[in-house]
Image (cartoon, rainbow, N blue to C red):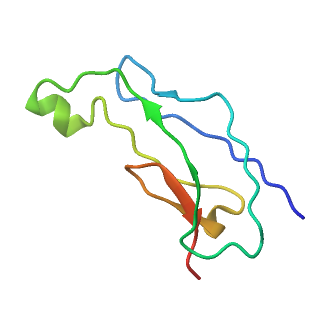
């Protein structure tokens, strides 16, 4: 058994910071988990508006997900949907 903590860094473009659906996420993943198996879905909501074309181009109101840090190479995340899955080898 091993354990890894993942810390989320939020990079905000303008005034409203994205808020995750829950404060903490805790999961267990078996070593035998098959690649592409979704192990967690994270969701954040950004209340910034994207009413103009310029705001849309700047990404206002959009949330994108990525993984970094120790053991991030074992997983991949859908940058738009927030699905985290075991990485294909």
Which residue in the rendered view is the most extreme toward the top?
Answer: 15
Answer with the quarter of the image where residue 62 lies.
Answer: top left
Residue 9, quarter of picture: top right
Decide which of 59, 27 is in the foreground and name it: 27
Residue drawn at x 45%, y 27% is 18
Q: Quadrant of the N terminus?
A: bottom right
* Residue at 66% from the left image edge and 55% from the top image edge: 69
Which x, y percent locates residue 74? Answer: 65, 69
Taking 34 as reference, is 14 above or below it?
above
**Residue at the spot x=18%, y=35% of the render?**
56
Seen from the viewer's position, the closer of residues 34 and 49 is: 34
Relative vertical location of residue 28 with respect to residue 10 in this rendering, above or below: below
How many numbered circles does the render carry? Answer: 0
Left/right placement of residue 70 relative to residue 43 reads right
Most distant residue in the right direction: 1
Can you give x and y, in whole percent of width and height, for residue 7 in the image? 67, 41
What residue is rendered at 37% in x and 49% in y?
80
Compared across the picture, whether 33 is left or right of 66 comes to right
Q: Indicate the position of residue 78 as horizontal and vertical percent values.
A: 44, 57
Looking at the image, residue 77 sits to the left or right of residue 35; the answer is left
Q: Quadrant of the C terminus?
A: bottom right
Query: Residue 82: image x %, image y %?
Result: 47, 49
Residue 53 occupies quadrant: top left
Residue reaching furthest to the left: 53
């Amino acid at each position: 058994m091993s354990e890894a903590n993942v810390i989320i860094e939020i990079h905000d473009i303008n005034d409203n910071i994205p808020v995750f659906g829950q404060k903490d996420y805790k999961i267990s993943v078996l070593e035998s988990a098959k690649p592409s198996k979704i192990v967690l879905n994270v969701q954040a909501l950004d209340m910034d508006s994207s009413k103009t074309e310029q705001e849309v181009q700047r990404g206002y109101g959009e949330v994108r997900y990525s993984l970094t840090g120790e053991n991030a190479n074992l997983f991949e995340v859908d940058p738009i949907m927030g699905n985290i899955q075991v990485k294909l080898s």
